[in-house]
Amino acid sequence: MKKIPDLSFWKLWNISFGFFGVQIAYALQSANISRIFSTLGADPHSLSYFWILPPLAGIIVQPIIGALSDKTWCRFGRRIPYLFVGALIAVLVMCLLPNAGSFGMSVSAAMIFGLFSLMFLDTSINIAMQPFKMMVGDMVNEKQKGLAYSIQSFLCNAGSLAGYLFPFIFAAIGISNIAPKGVIPDSVIYSFYIGAAILIICVIYTTVKVKEYPPELYAEYHGITKEIKEEKSNIFSLLVKAPKAFWTVGLVQFFCWAAFMFMWTYTNGTVAAGVFNTPSVEVIKDGISHMVLDTQSVQYQNAGDWVGILFAVQAVGSVLWAMALPLFKSRKFAYALSLILGA
């Protein structure tokens, strides 16, 4: 089997550079979706229902994109066409989603529009995200994979940091952080616009700079024979044959993502109520009176900006930690230590 050659640092960097833009989009989504839907008029007790769609989209889309891109080859490569299409859809949705309350629709119509926008945004982010992970496996040898994933982790967390800080920065420079009832503040809208612009620039950069291995060379590097290529398999048979490490990591990820979902869903309301003393207003639903946070108040929107700051602290720690990861000889120890520090 032919060995994959060593790549220069900048070639490894180029493979993952688009991840910076993708992660900005993901950070804007994770830090602001609860804020957006609460501002549109969603019941704070029902926010978790809106968050069902993103992981559901990931479960469906990621394996499909992986399987399809395995069988794809065109003049632009195997993975790059998918990440480019995913990025284009994400850019379009990022320009529409924060404007859900600005089109003159009723509260229920605006939330349905926002819900479908969220579904398309998360689906497109997943379409764009998966190819970056796969390209490291496709193009990097075992010796350099630790460094390659460290670079990817650095860019990933640097993108998160930028996305988390955008609303706070825009509010700090004087862009309006409050808006009429049911309308998203300009500080959030502009954050999504800038995030969309950076995303497409980063993906174009990777598309231009990275040349994937053609099918024949890829097969030589990965020991793929004609018999293996013709072997029929589907996602269920692959799951049955998956090694123990796959299920172990999957179980750990299950509990990690359960915690993330709680954090993304309820941090905004918790910080607004517990730290910024956001006033409450009375809402009558199904004949029953409820007290909910006033999402039009400056306190609520300031709290939303500071949630981004809180998430950014975590991103800074992750950026620094990504730089330290290549120093560990044992990946298993580095991964275990990362989980302990993250927890």
Image (tube, rainbow, N blue to C red):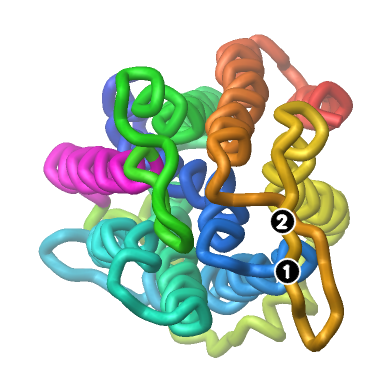
Q: Is residue 148 magenta?
A: no
Q: Amino acid at mark 1?
A: Val
Q: In this view of the protein, which residue sits in the foreground, 280 or 61?
A: 280
Based on the displayed image, in which of its 4 quarters is residue 319 positioned?
top right
- Which region shows up in magenta? 188-212
Residue depicted at x 64% and y 50%: 294
Assign a secondary structure to mark 1. strand
Figure quadrant of residue 289: bottom right
**Residue identifier under label 2:** 281
**Crowd band around label 2 with a 10 angstrom C-alpha radius: few (<14), some (14–19), many (20+):** few
Disc 1 packing (10 Å; few <14; some 14–19; many ≥20): few
Which residue is located at x 87 percent, y 52 percent? 255
Q: Residue at x 82, y 86 (%)?
A: 287
Q: Amino acid at mark 2?
A: Val
Q: Which of the 4 image quarters holds residue 178?
A: top left
Q: Main secondary structure of the magenta part?
A: helix
Say which residue label 1 marks. Answer: 283
Q: Is residue 312 left or right of residue 269?
A: left
Q: Position of residue 231 (x, y in %)?
A: 53, 85
